[in-house]
């Protein structure tokens, strides 16, 4: 399959380049998320953080005009959050 894409001319090579760049990008995003979680876990312990509140997630919908007529609808979501009071005097929502 890769050979056919490579031999398929500029379109196939472009598609192959996009795939080849997406894989490292996804890996980088996952790695950054894991690093952030580890840093927060250490911070919680070092600063004696305790849970002081919770917010549930929400679903957001919006409507808007589309060029050429018609209406588009989009749907998004916000995650739930937990409030952490730490001994540095700050409340962190994660």
Image (cartoon, rainbow, N blue to C red):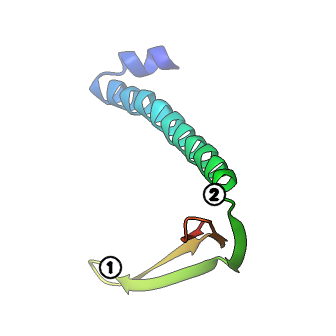
Q: Quadrant of residue 64?
A: bottom left
Residue 47: where, in percent of width, then height?
63, 57
Using the image as rendered, state which of residue 17 and residue 85 is in the foreground. 85
Q: Vertically, is 50 above or below 14?
A: below
Using the image as rendered, state which of residue 46 and residue 20 is in the foreground. 46
Q: Residues within 10 Å of mark 1 (few under 14, many from 20)?
A: few
The residue singled out by tag 1 in the image is 66
At x 61%, y 65%, the residue is 87
| Lower sequence index among marks 1 and 2 | 2
At x 56%, y 46%, the residue is 33
Circle 2: element type: loop
Residue projecting furthest to the right: 51
Q: Residues within 10 Å of mark 2 (few under 14, many from 20)?
A: few
Circle 1: element type: loop
Residue 89: where, in percent of width, then height?
55, 71
- Tell me whether circle 1 and circle 2 mark residues in contact (CB < 8 Å): no
Using the image as rendered, state which of residue 82 and residue 45 is in the foreground. 45
Q: Vertically, is 17 above or below 88?
A: above
The residue singled out by tag 2 in the image is 47
At x 27%, y 79%, the residue is 68
Give the left or right position of residue 20, taking residue 34 as reference.
left
Q: Vertically, is 20 above or below 55?
A: above
């Amino acid at each position: 399959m890769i050979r056919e894409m490579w031999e398929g001319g500029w379109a196939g090579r472009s598609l192959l380049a996009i795939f080849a760049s997406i894989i490292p990008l996804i890996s980088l995003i996952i790695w950054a998320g894991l690093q952030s979680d580890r840093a927060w876990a250490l911070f919680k312990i070092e600063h004696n953080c305790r849970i002081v509140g919770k917010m549930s997630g929400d679903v957001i919908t919006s409507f808007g005009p589309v060029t050429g007529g018609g209406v588009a609808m989009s749907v998004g979501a916000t995650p739930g959050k937990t409030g952490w009071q730490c001994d540095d005097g700050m409340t962190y929502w994660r």
